[in-house]
Amino acid sequence: MISPDSDRNRLFRHDGRIAINTIRAAFAGWNDRLVAVAVLIITLAMIKSWLAERPWTIAAWSAVGAGLLLGTSAERLVAKRLAFHGFDGLLAVDALRPATRRRYIAAWHGIALALLATVLLVVAPSLLIVGCASYLAGTLLAALMSGVTVPKRLADRVGSARVIRAWLRHGQAGALVASTLLVVLLLERSLTPNTLIAILGIETTLLTLALTSVDSDVVRFMATTGYGPWRIVGYHGKSMAYFLALAVPGCWLIAGSVAAAVVTAVSGAVLLLLVLRVLAYCLHGKRFADLIVSIFAGLLLFLAYFLPIALPFLAVAILWQLQHRARTKTWLLA
């Protein structure tokens, strides 16, 4: 016989089992677990080192920003999950009960808050109260913003935005974006060298991020229909190849070798992010894949700041691990 308390908490237990099984599937092999543990330890050590070198005010504001971001993200994720259960889930009756919803929300936020507190106790105990309070403020802010609706006219543009993102993957888009960058660079030649390089770096970052958008559904479909991971990367990176072929020599002629090096470095970093996202989408759903990519990207950024000489080795190790697992998903219909 199922106890009343167990019956009231079955919605949370249902999603808890899904989360545990997802983590087990993501780190099924012992080598995957070793890599995950190593990444976690290195990341915590780098965060601890970075916070220790900063004044308490800067560290506190960093904790506030991280807490707000985590709180709003967690609240939105929980709200979306409850909405799914209420409309399409197996436990729709439970998801529509106010008392069960409150317990579900409190349980997941309790777990997230406990994890955040554990991390803060490891990296910076003095920021525990600030970080946890910011997390709670973030959840409250997200809950208040949940009632804000998107205008219908703006919502109708979602389809056209998807068409634009698809066009940005073609080579013509890369050539057009590179030409635009070069024209703007010609107009900016009157600026001081340092200002010109800084603006060029920002412009290149924004333009290349637009060229490297990745649709997780497209990646999964291509993987299940026989496309290998590197072939999928080539499909999504075609516009970047055209961009680099025009932008790098053009910047060299207009502004010198330093400008060309900046464009090359920024484009290389964005391409690495593209490869990470494609390989992660071959393996996992969008949310979990984005989480993994965010962790890897943050780790690489910290390593680039603290120990640049080790950056290529870690990047190659991460890429090899992801592509080795992504190859097994080719033709796998699941």
Image (spheres, grey):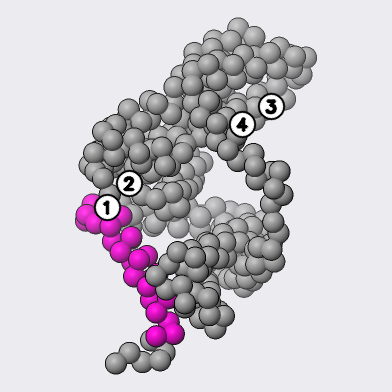
Q: Which residue corresponds to mark 2?
A: 283
- Do callouts 4 and 1 mark residues in contact (Cβ within 8 Å)? no
Measured Cα–Cα span from mark 4 to mark 2: 27 Å
Depth order, front residue of 52/6: 6
Q: Which residue corresponds to mark 3?
A: 199
Disc 2 residue type (three-letter): Leu
Measured Cα–Cα span from mark 4 to mark 1: 33 Å
Image depth: mark 4 or mark 3 in front:
4
Measured Cα–Cα span from mark 1 to mark 2: 13 Å
* Residue range (magenta): 7-31
Which type of secondary structure does the marked residue at label 4 adopt?
A: helix
Mark 2 neighbour density, 10 Å: few (under 14) some (14–19) many (20 or more) = many
Q: Which residue corresponds to mark 1?
A: 32
Q: Which residue corresponds to mark 4?
A: 206
Q: Is residue 11 above or below residue 255?
A: below
Q: Earlier in the sequence, mark 4 or mark 2?
A: 4
* Res. 96 in view: yes
Residue 309 falls inside the magenta stretch: no
Q: Residue at x 38, y 76 (%)?
A: 13
Image depth: mark 3 or mark 2 in front:
2
- Do callouts 4 and 2 mark residues in contact (Cβ within 8 Å)? no
Disc 4 residue type (three-letter): Leu
* Res. 112 in view: no
Q: Earlier in the sequence, mark 1 or mark 3?
A: 1
